[in-house]
Amino acid sequence: MSRIDFFKRIIGWSLGFILLIGVFAPTAEAGRYVLNQTPQTIKSYFGAPAKQILTAKGITYVYSPAGFRRLFPDNSQSVFKVNFVKNRVQNIILETDFSKKLTNFMDDIKINFSRFYNYIFGYKPSVWKQLSSKFSGNETIYDYEYCLGDGVATQFSMGGADQNVLGGEATFYYDTHCEPPY
């Protein structure tokens, strides 16, 4: 075999390997980058916000698009907010009324948060791993923090006598504990 044939084979194998890596790339790479992005990038994903609120730390965009409402058809009041600090996305807040009792609350929460995560980031969360849970000072309110993978965590509160009523907000944000490996 000549040197030219040898290099052609190496190049062929290398290109094949690169194509194979692209086919089997993790789903996160097929999604949207949202956290730490600029307002212009977020507008390109979700359109113009319904409202903008100036805060002490930055600005909050409030969204209530029809596509988002399809995720929670029982609640037409659902909105999500994107908080910017220094012109970068700091966190995303899901505000919806889950005040009805949930039959199997953690499964219901997981399903609804997975839908929301998929809507925001463009792919399903890779994990559902509890980071913390604790009473928040009031014995009927319990705070939860979960890792959803790829650096994204969520925090929400449950309350009621049976701990099966979700509070009004869930926050999604970056947390180093949620970076792979899990």
Image: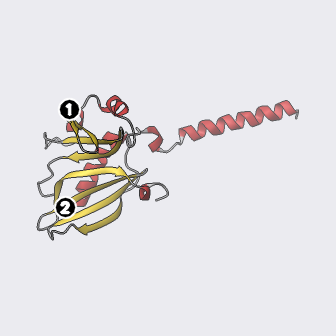
Amino acid type at circle 1 is Ala
Q: Is residue 53 left or right of residue 44?
A: left
Q: Quadrant of residue 104?
A: bottom left
Q: Residue furthest bottom?
A: 139
Q: Residue at x 59, y 39 (%)?
A: 20
| x then y, percent, for residue 71 | 23, 41
Along the viewing direction, whichever of 112 and 178 lies nearer the viewer:
178
Residue 117 in picture, x, y percent from top left:
32, 45
Identity of the residue drawn at 58% across and 41% down:
21
Per the rendering, the mark at residue 166 is none
Q: Is residue 37 visible?
A: yes
Residue in the picture at 23% in, 38% down: 54
In the image, is 72 to the left or to the right of 46?
A: left
- In the drawing, does residue 50 fall left or right of residue 8? left
Q: Is residue 45 above or below residue 28?
A: above
| 40 vs 157, nearest the viewer | 40
Q: Which residue is mark 2?
A: 158
Residue type highlighted by circle 2: Met
Question: In the figure, residue 165 lies in which quadrant?
Answer: bottom left
Percent position of residue 64, x then y? 20, 35
Residue beneath the point at 25% across and 49% down:
112
> Which of 137 and 105 lies nearest the eye of the viewer?
137
Cβ atoms at labels 2 and 1 below 8 Å apart = no
Q: Identify the disc placed on residue 66.
A: 1
Helix, strand or loop at disc 2?
strand
Residue that protrudes farthest toward the right in the picture: 2
Q: Secondary structure at mark 1?
A: helix
- Residue 135, how many percent across, how many down? 22, 69
Figure check: 176 above or below 136 = above
Q: Earlier in the sequence, mark 2 or mark 1?
A: 1
Figure colour scheme: secondary structure
